[in-house]
Image: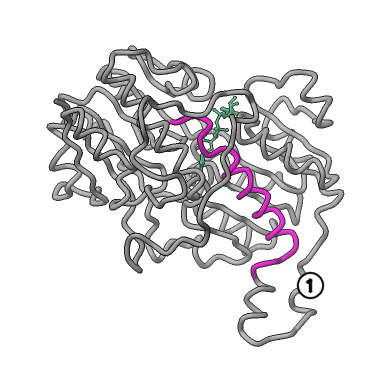
Amino acid sequence: MATVLCVLYPDPTTGYPPHYARDEIPLIADYADGQSLPRPRGPLGFRPGELIGCVSGELGLRHVLEKAGHKLIVTSDKEGPGSEFERWLPEADVVISQPFWPAYLTAERIARAPRLKLAVTAGIGSDHVDLAAAAAAGITVAEVTGSNCVSVAEHVVMMVLALVRNYLPSHAISVTGGWNIADCVARSYDLEGMHFGTIGAGRIGLAVLRRLKPFDVPLHYTQRHRLAAETEAELGLTFHPDVSSLVRAVDIVNLQLPLYPATEGLFNDAMFSTMKRGAYLINTARGRLVERDAVVRALESGHIAGYAGDVWFPQPAPVNHPWRTMPFNGMTPHIAGTSLSAQARYAAGTLEILQDFFDGTPIPDDYLIVDGGRLAGTGAKSYGLT
Ligand code: NAD
C-alpha cells in the first residue's frame, strides 16, 4: 500500500460543487502535434467538465486509489513546518502537486521524505521541484505533458489582445458608469502588423504561433532546438539565434520556456532596456523568469507599454505583491492551464502516470522530467539542472 500525498488549491469560496455554466465540455480527439491524449486504464473517477483541481475534487482519484488499496491524503495546506504537507511528507511514496498552487519540493523537504519515489505535476512545469535534488535522491519527476497547452495558448492570445487593444481599462470604465472614449483609446492599437516573438516554441509556444498567424502579424521565435523547415515555412517564422536578437526585433515578446537555474531572471533591467519602447511582455511560463521589480520599473518609466502575466513567485502571491497594482498590467492568478477542460486532461494523465508507476510499466517519455538520477524525456529536451 502506498501513501499518495496530493496538494490542490482550495475549494471555491462560494462552496463546492459550483453551479456549472455548461453541461459538458467538447471532446478532443488527440493533441494537435499527434501526441495522444492521456489513456488511463479503467473508468475515470470524475465526469469531464467537473471542478476536480481543488481539494474537494481530489482530481477524481480517491475511489480509484482506495480501491487499489492505497492511501490518499489531499490538502491545500502546504507552507511551513506545521503544514499538513510537511506532516505527511515523511510517509509519502508519491507526491502530486499542481503548478497553480505549488507544493515546493525543496532539497530540504526532499531530505525529509525518505520513502518518496515519484513526484507528479498535475499539469505542466515541474520547477516547483528541486530537480537536481530529486535526481540525486532517485525520485522520478513526471508531468502531464500536452494536457493544457491549448488552454495556455488561448490565454496568451487573450492577453495579447487585451493589452494591445487596452481592453481591461476600457471594461473597467464601462462597468463603473463611464463613457469616456478618449481615455479608452489613448492607449489602444491594432494588433495587425505588429511583430510577435516567442522565447520557447515548444508545445505551447508553437500553439500560440499557430493561433496568431491569422491575425496577420509577422512571427518570430527563438529556442534551443530549431523547428522543422516546413513548420517555419508554413507559419512564415523568423528564427533568431538568441533571445537578445528576438527582443530587439519585435513589438510583443512572449515567454514560453521552462524555469530552471539558467533561465531565472532572464528579464532584468538590462534585457528590458533592449526592448522597443512601447513593447509588450506576456508571461504565462513562470514568474521567476522575470525580475520582480525590473518589470515594475519598465512599466512606470513608460519604456514598455504593458505586461500580462499568469505566473508569480511565490504562489499564492502576497496581497502586497507589486505586480497586482503596477500600471498597465493584465495579470491573472495562475489559471491559464486549469480551465475545466484542462483539468479533465491532466487528471486523466495523473491517473495514467500513477497506474504506470504502481504496475511497474514505464512512464511515457513525453511525461518524464527526471528519471534514473538524471533529466529524461521531455525534461532532457526542455530543462537544465544548472
Ligand atoms: P515544452 O517542453 O514543450 O517547450 C519548452 C521549450 O522551451 C522547448 O522547446 C525548449 O527548447 C525551449 N527552451 C528551453 N530552454 C530555453 C532557452 N534557454 N531559450 C529558449 N528556449 C528554451 O513545454 P510547454 O508545454 O510548451 O510549456 C512551456 C512552459 O509553460 C512550462 O515549462 C511551464 O513553465 C509553462 N506552463 C504554464 C502554464 C500555466 O497555466 N500558466 C501551463 C502549462 C505550462
Q: Position of residue 266 (x, y in %)?
A: 56, 38
Q: Quadrant of ligand 1?
A: top right
Looking at the image, residue 183 lies above or below residue 304: below
Ligand 1 neighbours mark 1 (CB distance < 8 Å) = no
Is 363 left, or right, of 179 in this rendering?
Answer: left
Task: Please name the residue shown 42% across and 30% down the image.
Answer: 143
The one nearer the camera, 323 or 213, is 213
The kind of secondary structure element at disc 1 is loop
Looking at the image, residue 13 lies above or below residue 30: below
Query: Number of callouts in the render?
Result: 1
**Chief SS of the magenta region:** helix
Q: Position of residue 308 (x, y in %)?
A: 60, 55
* Residue 150 lies in the magenta stretch: yes
Does any portion of residue 120 appear in the rendered image? yes
* Residue 31 lies in the magenta stretch: no
Which residue position is annotated with label 1? Answer: 186
Which residues lie in the magenta part? 144-168
Is 224 left, or right, of 212 in this rendering?
Answer: left
Q: Residues within 10 Å of mark 1 (few under 14, many from 20)?
A: few
Q: Position of residue 81 (x, y in %)?
A: 15, 46
Q: Which picture quadrant has residue 255?
A: top right
Is 95 left, or right, of 128 in this rendering?
Answer: left
The one nearer the camera, 372 or 1, is 1
Task: Please name the residue shown 71% across and 40% down the image.
Answer: 247
Query: Identity of the amino acid at label 1?
Result: Ala
Q: Position of residue 201 (x, y in %)?
A: 65, 31
